[in-house]
Image (cartoon, grey):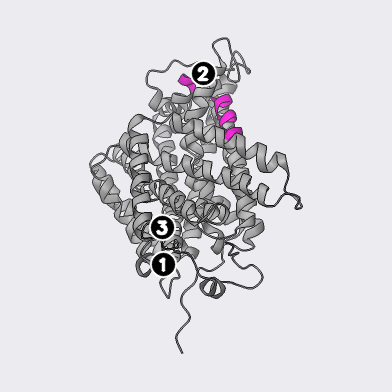
Amino acid sequence: MNARPAQLTRRLSLASVVAFGLAYMAPSLVMVIFGVIAVSSAGTAPTAFLVATGAMALTALSYAKMARHHPASGSAYVYARRSIGSRAGFLVGWTVLLDYLFLPMVAWLVQSIYLNAQFPAVPVWVWMLINAGLTTLVNIVGLKLTDRVNKLLTALAVFLVLLFVAYCLVHLGEEPPQSFTAPVWNAESSITGVSAAAAVAAYSYLGFDAVTTLSEETRDARRTIPRAVVLVIAVGGLLFTAVAYIMQLVHPGAVFDDPEIASYTMSVEVGGQTFADWTNMAAVIGGFASGLAVQLSSSRLLYTMGRDGVLPKRFFGALHPRTGTPVLCLLVTGAMCFVGLGVSLATATSFINFGAFLGFTAVNACVVVHFFRNRGADGVKVLGHVVAPALGACVTLYLMTRLSTAALAIGLCWLAAGFAYLLWLTRGFRRPTPELSLSEAASSRSGDDAVAVES
């Protein structure tokens, strides 16, 4: 009798999933980009973050709805496949791969640049290999270890951010601000400026969607994953907005010697040089946790597409029999660090957002399609299933228009390559797009919390 193939195991709690989402977003990111947002918004960074939170919350609600209807790993790929059709699902999944496949590389590159700044004797490429190697090893060992390491690092990163805020509050006690409302709106503020800054700030929220790739490893996924998506946006948005408000009180206005290192300069001002060096560790620790979470979610998307057969099944669709992790998928994402060795940070970040925003738009569209297929059903309302996702789609499409010409060109070329692969895979649409069979789905079910397989 053949041994039963390894399956994803439901281990994660709500707290674990939320911690992965926050790690993906990186709590210290608000400190890193504060100066840039303050300049763009004419000194109203917290307002820009608040607007970005509301805008991205529309799409987060769409993810929450689809996660409740389809509690399977694969995120936008699965939702589009089951709501719109297998071919649309393939193209959405292929496009999202641009984000998920290269984002671990970006996380490691950012982390390595910070570490090189802290320890200049060690080159960036060495830190790159160390970061990629460590996160890959932790993820391969198993989800239990990954969960523990991620919780510890995320808690430590949040603590260091809050410690920075505490020093800022002490500083404000000694030098009270002239106005508590200027960071929200001032004489230089404009709707155009705040909107432009909010569009930049919205990139900080990428990652709330990644928790949906953990659906098949989460207990009571139908209930837990939707709650986690909303909590990640709510907690992340509250943290970003509050920290930006305190920072804007410490440094009113939009004039900086160098906006890109505003938080470091501010750390020196409120706590001294030694403290500033330590607060840099928030970005370093948060960067490692982010790389861990990003690689975890990326490997799950690759595994789901491999299990469905749209990627080579024997390679991508296999789990290690002992650890229950998609080892080969993790090795592929780990190997992306070698691509990052010869790519600048600006180039690396310019094109991955194309896949993210197209995926967001597709999930909003899936909610609308679900409404028209299930009109009259309990809980399916026009406001939540048409108006909100339509607004969410408008926001994400607008964000796509803000991408550089190069980013759009690379994204469209990637999409065209996916269409060509789909043509080959289906032999010119004469064959159905591969998908998870009912027998395979049945073998992966676990009690009452089975993964829904719908066509």
The range drawn in magenta is: 38-55
The crowding category of the residue bearing disc 3, from other C-alpha atoms within 10 Å (few below 14, some 14 to 19, many at least 20), is few
Residue occupied by mark 1: 317
Q: Nearer the viewer, mark 2 or mark 3?
A: 3
Separation of marks 1 and 3 at Cα, in angstroms: 23 Å
In percent of the image, x 50 and y 29: which residue is there?
199
First in sequence: mark 1 or mark 2?
Answer: 2
The answer to whether residue 297 is seen in the rendering is yes
Q: Secondary structure at mark 3?
A: loop
- Residue that extends furthest to the bottom in the rendered view of this protein: 1
| Label 1 crowd bin: few (<14), some (14–19), many (20+), radius 10 Å | many
Q: Quadrant of residue 12?
A: bottom right
143 relative to 132 in the view: left or right: right
Q: Which residue is mark 2?
A: 193
**Quadrant of the rendered structure where residue 52 is?**
top right
Along the viewing direction, whichever of 83 and 169 lies nearer the viewer: 83
Where does residue 68 sit, x and y in percent of width and height?
64, 55
Front-lying residue, 284 or 370: 370
Indicate whether 16 appears above or below 6.
above
Residue under pointer 3: 429
For marks 1 and 3 on the same chain, the one whose residue lies earlier in the sequence: 1
Report the amino acid beneath label 1: Gly
Camera-nearest label, 1 or 3? 3
Residues at badges 2 and 3 in contact (C-beta under 8 Å)? no
Kindly report the distance in space between the C-alpha atoms of the residues bearing marks 1 and 2: 46 Å
Q: Main secondary structure of the magenta part?
A: helix
Q: Is residue 155 visible?
A: no
Amino acid carrying label 3: it is: Phe
Front position in the image: 446 or 388: 388
What quarter of the picture does the C terminus occupy?
bottom right
How packed mark 2 is, by other alpha carbons closer than 10 Å (few <14, some 14-19, many 20 or more), is some
Residue 50 is inside the magenta segment: yes
